[in-house]
């Protein structure tokens, strides 16, 4: 071929696609439009799975949880300004939750944007993304695409994982360059998240503190689930003999029914422990910042295992910080414990077990209720049995009562099977998480959603039907946010927390060819979920819940500010 003929040229579109493929990124979540429509088409033609959503926020949440499940950055692709902003919530969410994700967004012409001359979808996206992510990059020249993507991947997965923004202006895609030079400009990222070995002295210090404890506790967070060091963590916990408390998304890392699990004795272990080892969990609001009433009177010593050194002492003093990746840290603990490690004191274990068994026994009769309309416990009792029988099912969960009660009732049996609202308690993750969970793992998904929670991403049921994903959505329909019983005494408008009474969300699913079921009793619910999981057909079950059954804000009502002027 003569130099300069078409065969020897490549362009920005192809370089982006080749760079993704070279780095093993085989799935992209997004919404098409100017300037990235053709990028999506070409990526699909090149064998990348491109999942097209109805709203970028849901595509972004999908990418974020893909990152959590795979330890590879989940990629979300959006158009400029409004599409970018829709995706940005998810990028910030990924950063907050320590999930690796890359938001790739097309953007408008730099020259026009910077002079604020009113371009199509004009916005200085790079500047806006920066404070909400770990790193933000823009690529202006086709020959820099390889480096740009390599930097984005490294930033997303190394150290504490998080969200990265990659800005690709429209003009970049049509830039051409020599194909050989283009291929050479691509970078295959080697060892994107290198092992981070803890210092031997930090390991020894931590074990010395743990050994000195009379009432030790291990708290496992979603960082421990992310690390995929499941066997090492299990061996360490069992060898230590220490009771463990899983944070919400760490449930199942060791089974909830494990004899050392203190999930059902939460208050007791937080109050009474004298040494607490945090593994991939932060002392943020979900752990009452490590102080105050929740943690009781007795003095406590904290050991913290985390990849992020700046996390140490964020809320209280950490007497034994261990900085490294969790796999390496836990292996180092196991090596240093040797053969003669004596397990935690048995009287403490017995105290924890007693409290746990009491709480489990107290809850048991509530789970048997077959009342109609259902209350939360009756409905969840049915779902708990299903998950016990099908432990590989991925359980997605959002809402207030629907979230808090499901967390306690539905035992998890395997790692990374529970996905929920995370650090922000955000509503809207439901359908995006479900789609990515099904796509990335090939496993069936059961999404248990408050009726309000579902509304934030409900249009994606069309996406679920379009891609024929094995997702069963159960909506706990109590006619509103927290409860469906509020009234507005001041006028004709409905109260701010209630929805149309008796809504039939199952009809939405039927509109797109999925299976819709209206379930009014736990028995009906159980039958419908089992049928959905057996068939793998997209299914939506409208589970009718007593509108009076819930409580304000679920388990976190105490966080609502109180007016001293208004009587409740
Ligand atoms: O030890 P004690 O005795 O204390 O007992 C504990 C355990 O030991 C015990 N337990 C058990 N007992 C028996 N058996 C078993 N197996 C067992 N397991 C545990 O049970 C108790 C409780 O245990 P738990 O849950 O572990 O402990 P606790 O004390 O609750 O833990 C504290 C927390 C803080 C760690 C925990 O509560 C937690 O993780 N909470 C997360 C809460 C959260 O994130 N909530 C979501 C946000 S709420 C609100 O913001 C909502 N909004 C506003 C909004 C949001 N969020 N986002 C956006 C984008 N816009 C707006 C909205 C709109 S929620 C919401 C919608 C709500 O309406 P829906 O219709 O969707 O939902 P419904 O409420 O159902 O109507
Ligand atoms: P949870 O909400 O479950 O308590 P958090 O999101 O608060 O969990 O905490 C997760 C922690 O795990 C973060 O501080 C993060 O730096 C850390 N982390 C994430 N991945 C790893 C890893 N591979 N090794 C060590 N720490 C990690
Ligand atoms: Mg509700």
Image (spheres, rainbow, N blue to C red):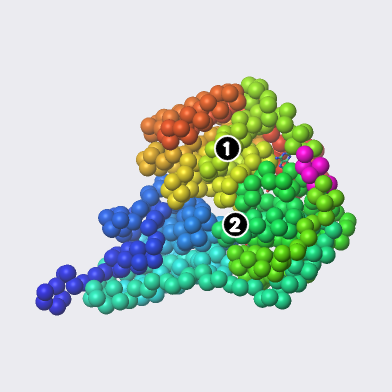
Q: Residue furthest left?
A: 2
Q: Is residue 262 left or right of residue 499?
A: right
Overall secondary structure of the magenta stretch? helix
Q: Residue furthest right?
A: 297
What residue appears at the point 31 percent right and 68 percent down from the top-left corner?
Answer: 15
Q: Is residue 459 above or below residue 289?
A: above
Residue for badge 1: 387
Element on which disc 2 rests: helix
Element on which disc 1 rests: helix
**Spatial distance from mark 1 to mark 2, Cα to Cα?**
22 Å
What residue appears at the point 27 percent right and 77 percent down from the top-left corner?
Answer: 181
Residue for badge 2: 231
Magenta highlight on residue 356? yes
Q: Is residue 181 above or below residue 278?
A: below
What residue appears at the point 76 percent right and 63 percent down from the top-left corner?
Answer: 341
Q: Nearer the viewer, residue 57 or 495?
A: 57
Magenta highlight on residue 194? no
What residue appears at the point 37 percent right and 58 percent down from the top-left corner?
Answer: 26
Q: Say if residue 326 shows up in the picture.
A: yes
Q: Quadrant of the C terminus?
A: top right
- Expressed as whole percent of the image width and height from the top left, the position of residue 466 reads 36, 40
Give the mark count: 2
- Expressed as whole percent of the image width and height from the top left, the position of residue 439 reads 43, 48
- Magenta-highlighted residues: 351-357
């Amino acid at each position: 071929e003569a130099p300069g003929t078409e065969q020897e040229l490549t362009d920005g579109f192809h370089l982006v696609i080749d760079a993704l493929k070279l780095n093993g990124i085989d799935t992209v979540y997004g919404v098409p439009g100017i300037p990235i429509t053709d990028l999506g088409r070409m990526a699909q033609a090149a064998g990348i799975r491109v999942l097209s959503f109805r709203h970028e926020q849901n595509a972004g949440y999908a990418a974020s949880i893909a990152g959590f499940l795979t330890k590879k950055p989940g990629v979300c692709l959006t158009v400029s300004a409004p599409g970018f902003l829709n995706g940005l919530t998810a990028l910030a969410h990924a950063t907050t939750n320590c999930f690796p994700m890359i938001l790739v967004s097309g953007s408008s012409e730099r020259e026009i944007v910077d002079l604020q001359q009113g371009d199509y979808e004009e916005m200085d996206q790079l500047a806006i993304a920066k404070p909400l992510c770990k790193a933000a990059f823009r690529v202006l020249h086709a020959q820099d695409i390889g480096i740009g993507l390599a930097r984005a991947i490294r930033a997303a997965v190394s150290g504490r994982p998080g969200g990265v923004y990659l800005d690709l202006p429209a003009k970049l895609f049509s830039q051409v360059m020599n194909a050989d030079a283009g291929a050479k400009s691509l970078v295959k990222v080697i060892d994107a998240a290198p092992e981070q070995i803890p210092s031997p002295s930090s390991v020894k210090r931590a074990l010395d503190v743990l050994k000195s404890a009379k009432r030790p506790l291990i708290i496992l967070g979603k960082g421990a689930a992310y690390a995929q060091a499941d066997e090492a963590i299990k061996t360490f916990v069992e060898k230590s003999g220490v009771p463990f408390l899983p944070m919400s998304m760490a449930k199942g890392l060791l089974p909830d029914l494990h004899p050392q699990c203190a999930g059902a004795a939460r208050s007791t272990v937080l109050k009474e422990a004298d040494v607490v080892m945090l593994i991939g969990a932060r002392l943020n609001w979900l752990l009452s910042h490590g102080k105050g009433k929740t943690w009781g009177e007795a003095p406590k010593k904290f050991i913290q295992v985390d990849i992020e050194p700046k996390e140490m002492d964020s809320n209280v003093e950490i007497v034994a910080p261990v900085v490294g990746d969790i796999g390496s840290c836990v292996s180092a603990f196991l090596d240093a414990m040797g053969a003669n490690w004596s397990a935690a004191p048995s009287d403490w274990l017995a105290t924890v077990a007693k409290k746990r068994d009491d709480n489990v026994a107290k809850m048991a009769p509530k789970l048997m209720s077959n009342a109609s309309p259902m209350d939360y416990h009756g409905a969840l009792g049915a779902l708990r049995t299903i998950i016990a029988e099908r432990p590989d099912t991925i359980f997605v969960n959002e809402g207030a009562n629907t979230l808090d009660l499901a967390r306690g009732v539905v035992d998890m049996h395997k790692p990374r099977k529970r996905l929920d609202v995370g650090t922000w308690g955000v509503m809207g993750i439901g359908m995006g998480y479900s789609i990515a969970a099904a796509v990335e793992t090939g496993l069936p998904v059961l999404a248990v959603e408050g009726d309000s929670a579902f509304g934030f991403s409900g249009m994606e049921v069309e996406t679920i039907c379009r891609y024929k994903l094995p997702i069963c959505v159960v909506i706990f329909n109590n006619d509103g946010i927290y409860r469906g019983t509020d009234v507005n005494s001041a006028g004709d408008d409905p109260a701010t927390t209630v929805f149309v009474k008796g809504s039939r969300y199952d009809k939405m699913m039927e509109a797109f060819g999925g299976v819709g079921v209206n379930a009014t009793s736990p028995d009906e619910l159980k039958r419908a979920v089992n049928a959905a999981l057996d068939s793998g057909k997209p299914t939506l079950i409208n589970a009718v819940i007593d509108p009076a059954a819930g409580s304000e804000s679920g388990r976190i009502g105490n966080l609502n500010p109180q007016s001293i002027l208004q009587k409740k």
